[in-house]
Image (cartoon, coloured by chain):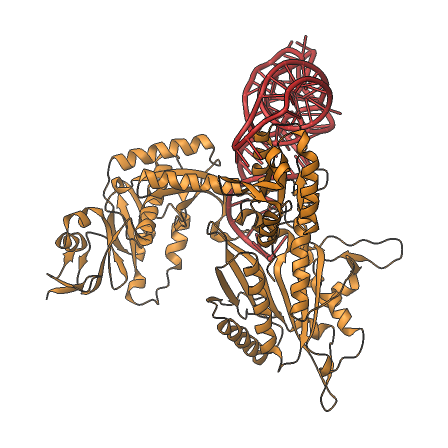
Chain colours: A orange, B red
RNA sequence: GCCGGAGUAGCUCAGUGGUAGAGCAACGGUUUCGUAAACCGUAGGCCAGGGGUUCGAUCCCCCUCUCCGGCUCCA
């Protein structure tokens, strides 16, 4: 019986039963058939030489699509494993999936790989690609597979983990063979190794088997593969560009902050320009908090260990806390890793009535967490940082509206800083929890509704919530498409319980309030670091530490430059006058490399006419003879902060 | 915390088992200049820290600290 293949344009291609993907593609066009790496029937990907037995929606997969690239990278990972097994006696292999922009493969070998090893392996891979070995799909029983892979313990573990209850297929295992190499794999693969157009190994590192730090540490090799060497080069350039945005490089370069070795790992000092930047961000945070009905509180950096026992942090968070400190017979104290217990104490400072609720308490609170030494990463992951933290106490009836308000706050906040793409995760109940199933249902539903109210796309992270309540994490995409987690809205059934929080409900019934933790920027340090990378250091004018650089052409223009500066400072602009003895070109170059949004060049004509030469960052031309008033108005307009 | 790599002037980097080098920045002088680097000069170093091997260590070995790439974790 012939199979009917519905092409993406709606036409139907009727083919004999058992037609291969390659033949079907050829029927559409020989060029397409040459470019094809796999076909898709009703969403199922098949190798080019697999017979098609049932019709459906048919697509030819080429390297122009993400699916095609995934196949390319998966096949590249196989070639990587093949090369490693060829070159290293006793090496065994674990898993090797395609990932964003590339692939990796995990190995167990005697010695970790060195950069020289990578070169050798890449050389062997090129030979395999040159030999154009066909990938052959092999179907075998579990028993056969266990036999074939008996020397490879990780493969055996994978085969044994295949759930036989998954219908008839559960007893079958597929693998792909090329030359003497065979690897377990669902496929599909490229028709042959020669179909890998461009590939490069990037680095090696350690990685735990199954991501479990208690299990074997394997050696992972990362690589990338692309449809052409142009695309590969573009990708490598993109990596370089991303490196130039690195906040650890740009921050010190722009004199924002630094990480003195004497200070300690994960700790930064903020320089005046970084301080200015943070002040603008934090001022905006305070204004927004007030606008959304939050009240500011302050709390100390440490508190009695007993407080952290009551809050439960010493049970579930101690490994992230700095050790206790104690003097003589005084009680032990702990530096705070979170602000919540303090805000709870504010709540408890007097009896509360339903009329007090919702009570929204906010603080830019400095916290300290003992991060594992391998994870600190500039100001994106520090040991001391400042949360724009808030804790809202409300009744059950208020919960829904409060969540909507918090999410509204978060999104407004992020938009003000130029982020437009958001993705949310809704983390739901894990196995062990505080709170009743009814409470969790209520809370998860309330969070989901808040997300829907804002028309925000979200993913449900099943079972990923912490034990004390479900939460929403909001992720942003930056200018070059990277995803960052900043904001979080977290419900808490635990602390109100542990601290026995209460309020008097109407009719003088005692009730327990709900509690919502919320961070908008997350940490001021991380958020600032993300902004540095997002804008590559060239901040929008309202954020820029120096908004206007004034460049007098010669010494005799300095007096006028001071006058202009004063005029602009009166208009609340942040202005610097460059009085170094350097040439005009040099001074302009410095202002531009420091990424100042505006440069005013002042010479004889300007002194005579009361004008300025205006040059804006990102524009490679300048405008001469702009009247000072006009320039000032324009700059003030550009520097306006989001209201 | 784990695996690997690295640490030389403020920054970017050369360098060698035998007294430490460049460019930029800094400082001094000359230049006073109209849109991305004027010229001359000066100074700057416990070669991350500590131990060892050696006649001699910045270089070789060990430990510690810090950073980088990952894993795990995460604001």
Q: Horizontal placement of A95 versus A552: left or right?
A: left
Please determine whether, in this image, residue B50 is positioned above or below residue A49.
above
Q: Position of residue A182 (x, y in %)?
A: 30, 45
Give whichever of A476, A561 is nearer the camera: A561
For the point 47% across and 67% down, the residue is A458
Residue A622 appears at what percent x and percent y? Answer: 51, 40
Residue lying furthest right: A329
Residue visible at 68% across and 30% down in the picture: A556
Residue shown at 50%/53% (left/top)?
A: A478
* Above-or-below relation of A571 to A434: above
Q: Tell which residue pokes out farthest to the front in this image.
A: A608
Residue A419: percent from left, percent from top: 52, 57
**Residue under the point 72% across and 72% down:** A498
> How many numbered marks are there?
0
Query: Is residue A612 among what the camera can see?
Result: yes
The answer to whether any part of residue A82 appears in the image is: no
Viewer-side residue, B35 vs B61: B35
The percent coordinates of residue A63 (x first, y second) are 29, 48
Q: State the residue in front, A576 or A624.
A: A624
Using the rendered view, name the quadrant where residue A166 is placed: bottom left
């Amino acid at each position: 019986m012939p199979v009917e293949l519905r092409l993406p344009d709606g036409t139907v291609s009727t083919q004999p039963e058992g037609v291969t993907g390659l033949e079907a593609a050829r029927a559409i066009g020989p060029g397409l058939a040459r470019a094809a790496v796999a076909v898709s029937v009703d969403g199922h990907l098949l190798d080019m030489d697999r017979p098609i037995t049932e019709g459906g929606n048919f697509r030819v997969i080429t390297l122009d699509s993400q699916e095609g690239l995934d196949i390319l990278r998966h096949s590249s990972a196989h070639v990587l494993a093949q090369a490693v097994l060829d070159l290293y006696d006793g090496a065994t292999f674990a898993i090797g999936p395609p990932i964003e922009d590339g692939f990796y493969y995990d190995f167990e070998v005697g010695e970790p790989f060195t950069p020289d090893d990578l070169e050798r392996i890449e050389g062997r891979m090129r030979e395999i690609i040159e030999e154009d070995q066909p990938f052959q799909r092999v179907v075998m029983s579990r028993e056969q597979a266990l036999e074939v892979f008996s020397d490879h313990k990780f493969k055996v573990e994978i085969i044994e983990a295949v759930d036989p209850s998954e219908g008839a297929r559960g007893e079958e295992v597929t693998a792909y063979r090329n030359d003497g190499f065979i690897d377990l794999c669902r496929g599909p693969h490229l028709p042959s190794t020669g179909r890998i157009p461009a590939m490069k190994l990037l680095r090696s590192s350690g990685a735990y088997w199954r991501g479990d730090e208690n299990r074997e540490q394997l050696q992972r090799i990362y690589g990338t593969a692309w449809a052409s060497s142009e695309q590969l080069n573009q990708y490598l350039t993109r990596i370089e560009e991303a490196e130039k945005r690195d906040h650890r490089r740009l921050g010190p370069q722009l004199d924002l902050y630094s990480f003195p070795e004497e200070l300690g790992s994960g700790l930064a000092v903020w320089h005046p320009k970084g301080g200015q930047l943070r002040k603008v961000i934090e001022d905006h945070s305070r204004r927004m908090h007030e606008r959304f009905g939050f009240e500011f509180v302050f709390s100390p950096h440490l508190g009695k260990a007993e407080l952290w026992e009551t809050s439960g942090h010493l049970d579930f968070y101690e490994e992230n806390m700095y050790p206790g400190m104690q003097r003589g017979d005084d009680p032990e104290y702990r530096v705070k890793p979170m602000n919540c217990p303090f805000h709870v104490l504010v709540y408890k400072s007097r009896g509360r009535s339903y009329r007090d609720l919702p009570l929204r308490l906010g603080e830019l609170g400095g916290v300290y967490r003992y991060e594992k030494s391998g994870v600190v990463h500039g100001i994106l992951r520090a040991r001391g940082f400042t949360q724009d933290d808030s804790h809202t106490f409300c009744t059950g009836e208020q919960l829904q509206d409060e969540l909507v308000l918090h999410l509204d706050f978060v999104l407004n906040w992020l938009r003000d800083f130029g982020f437009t793409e958001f993705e949310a995760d809704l983390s739901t109940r894990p196995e062990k929890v505080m709170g009743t199933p009814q409470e969790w249902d209520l809370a998860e539903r309330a969070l989901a509704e808040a997300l829907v109210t804002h028309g925000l796309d979200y993913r449900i992270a099943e079972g990923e919530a912490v034990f004390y309540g479900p939460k929403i994490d909001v992720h942003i995409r930056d200018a070059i498409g990277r995803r960052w987690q900043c904001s979080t809205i977290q419900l808490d059934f635990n602390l109100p319980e542990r601290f026995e929080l209460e309020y008097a409900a109407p009719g003088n019934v005692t009730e327990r309030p709900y509690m919502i933790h919320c961070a908008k920027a997350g940490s001021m340090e991380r958020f600032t670091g993300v902004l540095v990378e997002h804008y590559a250091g060239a901040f929008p004018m309202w954020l820029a530490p120096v908004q206007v650089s004034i460049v007098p052409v010669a010494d005799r223009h300095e007096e006028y430059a001071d006058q202009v500066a004063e005029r602009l400072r009166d208009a609340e602009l942040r202005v610097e006058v460059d009085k170094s003895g350097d040439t005009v070109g040099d001074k302009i170059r410095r202002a531009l490399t420091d990424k100042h949004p505006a440069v005013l060049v002042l010479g004889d004509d300007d002194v005579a006419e009361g004008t300025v030469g205006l040059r804006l960052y990102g524009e490679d031309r300048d405008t001469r003879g702009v009247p000072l008033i006009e320039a000032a108005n324009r700059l003030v307009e550009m520097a306006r902060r989001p209201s």
